[in-house]
């Protein structure tokens, strides 16, 4: 039963990932390829930063919902509180999954399909080995650990390659995660203090609306700073 809940959780999160960013990342491939063809390195670097920023904003918000409402989601979707711990543990993995998908799209747009294929093959092979080694000893948590290790290894390899090509590697990705992480942390405290006794649907809705509002304010401020730096608006007119 536990394995069934875990597999169902993983499948649902994979479907959510595909639905949420699949179309966006598919559009990244031709856009990156066009910039690569023109030899516009600065535009590729700018696009990479934008991908880091919006991937962090979206995925950390989704992570906050999965983590904070794991029990409610487990009960509503699967009719069992046993699914809550798996929703929680896999929910923490969401930002890494989303970022990995976006980074792979950028790499493919820059002609790194062969490298991406090699990483995915290594990911699948290592996953098979880890399942055989860890699951007999740790049970279902061995399978969870395999998912985590394979996803982190895949992301590390992909983002390391992207960093070599653009100069925007793991440090840049982490930097763009700081503010969304702070927002999500504050809203987690709000959830624990004020939203605990509310109906689950209302609590999730309020959490999501507050996060989107804070993310919008942050993006507006960051876009204004970027325009000032690039000279599209001057500090005098901005004031």
Image: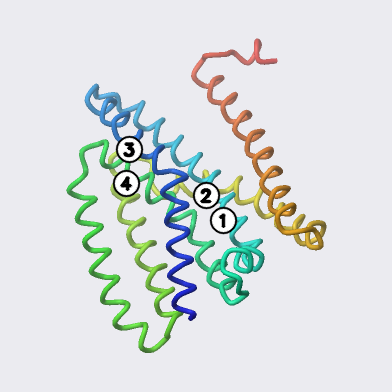
The vertical placement of 171 against 188, above or below, is above
Identify the residue under disc 4: 104
Earlier along the polypeptide chain: callout 3 or callout 1? 1
Tag 1–tag 2 contact (CB < 8 Å): yes
Front: mark 2 or 3: 2
In the picture, residue 224 is in which quadrant? top right
Identify the residue under disc 1: 63
Earlier along the polypeptide chain: callout 3 or callout 4? 4
| Cα gap from disc 1 to disc 2, whole angstroms | 6 Å
What mark, if any, has residue 59 been given in the picture?
2
* Mark 4 closeness class: few <14, some 14–19, many ≥20 residues within 10 Å: many
| Cα gap from disc 3 to disc 1, whole angstroms | 27 Å
* Mark 1 closeness class: few <14, some 14–19, many ≥20 residues within 10 Å: many
Task: From the viewer's perspective, tell me whether residue 38 is left or right of residue 54.
Answer: left
| Cα gap from disc 4 to disc 1, whole angstroms | 20 Å
Front: mark 3 or 4: 4
Earlier along the polypeptide chain: callout 2 or callout 3? 2
Identify the residue shown where x is 26% and y is 76%: 129
The vertical placement of 67 against 203, above or below, is below
Identify the residue under disc 3: 166
Q: How far from the left and from the top, in percent, is residue 172?
A: 45, 44
Secondary structure beneath dot 3 equals helix
Observer-nearest residue: 221 or 142? 142
């Amino acid at each position: 039963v536990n394995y069934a809940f875990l597999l169902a959780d993983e499948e649902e999160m994979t479907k959510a990932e595909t639905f949420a960013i699949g179309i966006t990342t598919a559009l990244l491939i031709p856009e990156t390829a066009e910039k690569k063809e023109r030899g516009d390195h600065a535009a590729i670097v700018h696009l990479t930063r934008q991908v880091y920023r919006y991937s962090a904003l979206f995925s950390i918000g989704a992570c906050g919902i999965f983590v904070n409402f794991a029990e409610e989601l487990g009960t509503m979707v699967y009719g069992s509180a046993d699914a809550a711990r798996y929703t929680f543990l896999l929910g923490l993995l969401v930002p890494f999954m989303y970022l990995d998908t976006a980074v792979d799209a950028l790499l493919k747009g820059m002609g790194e399909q062969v490298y991406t294929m090699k990483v995915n093959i290594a990911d699948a092979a290592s996953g098979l080995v880890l399942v055989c080694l860890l699951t007999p000893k740790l049970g279902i948590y061995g399978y969870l650990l395999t998912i985590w290790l394979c996803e982190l290894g895949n992301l590390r390899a992909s983002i390391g390659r992207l960093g070599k090509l653009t100069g925007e590697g793991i440090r840049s990705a982490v930097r763009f995660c700081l503010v969304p992480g702070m927002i999500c942390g504050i809203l987690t405290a709000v959830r624990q203090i004020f939203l605990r006794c509310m109906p689950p649907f209302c609590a999730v809705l309020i959490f999501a609306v507050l996060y989107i509002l804070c993310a919008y304010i942050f993006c507006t401020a960051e876009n204004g700073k970027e325009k000032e730096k690039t000279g599209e608006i001057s500090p005098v007119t901005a004031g």
